[in-house]
Amino acid sequence: MLQLPKPFDHHAATYLVQIAQASSDYAFGYFEGQGLGFAEGLHLANAITEDECSQLCLVFRDAADRRR
């Protein structure tokens, strides 16, 4: 399981819930993109490593794939 720094785990969980509960294709794509952007942003800010970023992106993609 991916262990994010404390301030960021809530945000990641929020994006996962939003992906799961999206009511339209637009909202679904929007929240998937937000989650992936969030992961990339954490990496660019040096809050997580490249490997952790890849793992977090995979979590968002897996959630999106399950939703499809």
Image: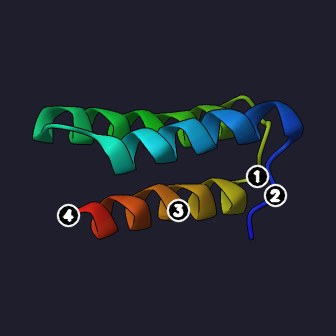
Tags 3 and 1 touching, CB below 8 Å: no
* Upstream in sequence: badge 1 or badge 2: 2
Q: Is residue 34 above or below residue 63?
A: above
Image quarter where the C terminus lies is bottom left
The 10 Å Cα crowd at callout 2, few under 14, some 14 to 19, many 20 or more, is few
The nearer-to-camera label among 1 and 4 is: 4
* Upstream in sequence: badge 3 or badge 1: 1
At 12% across and 41% down in the image, what residue appears? 25
Tags 2 and 4 touching, CB below 8 Å: no
Q: Which amino acid is tagged 2? A: Gln
Q: Which amino acid is tagged 4? A: Arg
* Upstream in sequence: badge 4 or badge 3: 3
Q: CA distance from mark 1 to mark 2?
A: 12 Å
Residue highlighted by disc 4: 68
Q: Secondary structure at mark 3?
A: helix
Q: Secondary structure at mark 4?
A: loop
* Upstream in sequence: badge 2 or badge 4: 2
Question: Among all residues in the image, which is located at the extreme right?
Answer: 6
Residue highlighted by disc 3: 59
Q: Which amino acid is tagged 1? A: Thr
Q: Is residue 51 above or below residue 11?
A: below
* Upstream in sequence: badge 1 or badge 4: 1
Residue highlighted by disc 1: 49
Residue highlighted by disc 2: 3
